[in-house]
């Protein structure tokens, strides 16, 4: 049986959001549409580079944009016109884009339009990450964005790899869809995804290991003694996608240059933590569960330890002291 992401979203809405009457599914449709536009542009990245540098006009008369600017615009355009959107916040915008100051807007959407941007030029997997929350009554703008991750009502990502894969959860399991480029539809291919309880991969930028706190260095040493393999792509989405499918542990510890860690809480750590927990895995910052952190700023950073339950619990036991 073939199930498209649209059908799946409608089924999830009927089963779990009976009061939503189409507005929730409309948001997710806006997201899938934007990611199709983004992937189409990414597939042409090499061609655009050959034709001219960013900011120039190519032979078809199109003004070129950097891919992350293009991705951000695609998401803002596809979501901004949707009913019930209250606030959009993006890695690419210093301040949230407030769509609706009335009480009509119900949802807050936060996103990293293009994750792994340093990998664009070298034809390595990149992605888009999103998080959806409900706007609390009487709360608007930035205040509506600063909610802990456990309040997310949906989260997901697309990894633009050899194929484009959309993975999402509305808090009732994790589902994955592969874009069939011939028909332009995302088709269900991973039903109720579960992260292995344990996996023999560790993923971390070991180039910075001299400045990792001792528990991280000790734990990495232990994993090496046990014969774990190292995998690090440098695009969080792609590293997470592998961890979801194969198990193991991903870490971005505090470092010399990023004392609070490098990754962003609201549009990187929170949505992936939501998916990890839904898939039976775990995500912590070294002290507490990622989803329990009360954010104080939209672009706030956090250390991230995420992956299989066994490995995350083991390292967490060491970082808690
Ligand atoms: P972005 O491209 O959205 O700025 O995110 C980059 C992030 C993340 O994708 C990746 O895991 C991490 O930066 C890599 O950082 P290092 O190069 O420091 O390892
Ligand atoms: Mn990112
Ligand atoms: Mn980004």
Image: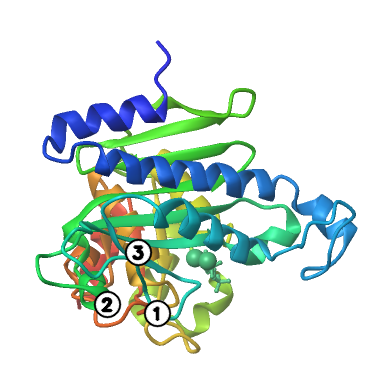
Say if residue 140 shows up in the picture. yes
In depth, the one of 158 and 65 nearer the eye is 65
**Residue at screen point 21% across, 75% down:** 287
Q: Which mark is residue 142?
A: 2
Circles 1 and 2: CB atoms closer than 8 Å: yes
Q: How is the image coloured?
A: rainbow
**Residue at screen point 72% across, 52% down:** 123
Residue indicated by mark 1? 95
Residue indicated by mark 3? 269
In depth, the one of 31 and 156 nearer the eye is 31
Callout 2: helix, strand or loop?
helix
Work out whether 182 lies above or below 313: above
In depth, the one of 52 and 241 nearer the eye is 52
For the residues labelled 2 and 3, the Cα–Cα distance comes to: 18 Å
Q: Counting residues from the N terminus, which is met first, the one under dot 2 or under dot 3?
A: 2
Disc 3 crowd rating (10 Å Cα; few below 14, some 14-19, many 20+) is many
Q: Is mark 3 within 8 Å of ligand 2?
A: no
Question: Is 57 situated left or right of 170 in this image?
Answer: right
Callout 3: helix, strand or loop?
helix
Q: Which mark is residue 318?
A: none
């Amino acid at each position: 049986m073939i199930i498209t992401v649209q059908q799946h979203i409608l089924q999830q809405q009927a089963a779990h959001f009976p009061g939503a009457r189409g507005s929730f599914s409309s948001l997710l449709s806006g997201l899938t549409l934007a990611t199709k536009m983004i992937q189409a542009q990414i597939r042409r990245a090499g061609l655009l580079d050959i034709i001219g540098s960013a900011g120039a006009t190519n032979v078809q008369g199109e003004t070129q944009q950097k891919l992350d600017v293009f991705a951000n615009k695609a998401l803002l355009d596809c979501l901004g016109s949707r009913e019930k959107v209250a606030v959009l916040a993006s890695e690419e915008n210093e301040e949230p884009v407030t769509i609706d100051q009335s009480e009509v807007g119900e949802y807050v959407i936060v996103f990293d339009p293009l994750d792994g941007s340093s990998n664009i030029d070298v034809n390595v997997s990149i992605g888009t990450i999103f998080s959806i929350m409900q706007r609390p009554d009487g709360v608007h703008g930035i205040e509506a964005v600063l909610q802990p991750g456990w309040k997310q009502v949906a989260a997901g990502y697309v990894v633009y790899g050899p194929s484009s894969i959309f993975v999402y959860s509305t808090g009732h399991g994790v589902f994955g869809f592969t874009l069939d480029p011939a028909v332009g539809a995302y088709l269900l291919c991973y039903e109720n995804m579960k992260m292995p309880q344990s996996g023999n991969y560790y993923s971390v930028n070991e180039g910075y290991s001299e400045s990792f706190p001792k528990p991280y260095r000790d734990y990495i040493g232990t994993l090496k003694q046990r014969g774990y393999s190292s995998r690090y792509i440098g695009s969080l989405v792609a590293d997470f996608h592998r961890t979801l499918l194969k198990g193991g542990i991903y870490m971005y510890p505090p470092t010399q240059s990023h004392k609070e860690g490098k990754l962003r809480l609201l549009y990187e750590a929170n949505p992936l933590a939501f998916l990890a927990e839904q898939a039976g895995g775990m995500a912590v910052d070294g002290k507490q569960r990622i989803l329990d952190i009360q954010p104080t700023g939209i672009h706030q950073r956090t250390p991230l330890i995420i992956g299989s339950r066994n490995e995350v619990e083991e390292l967490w036991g060491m970082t808690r002291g």
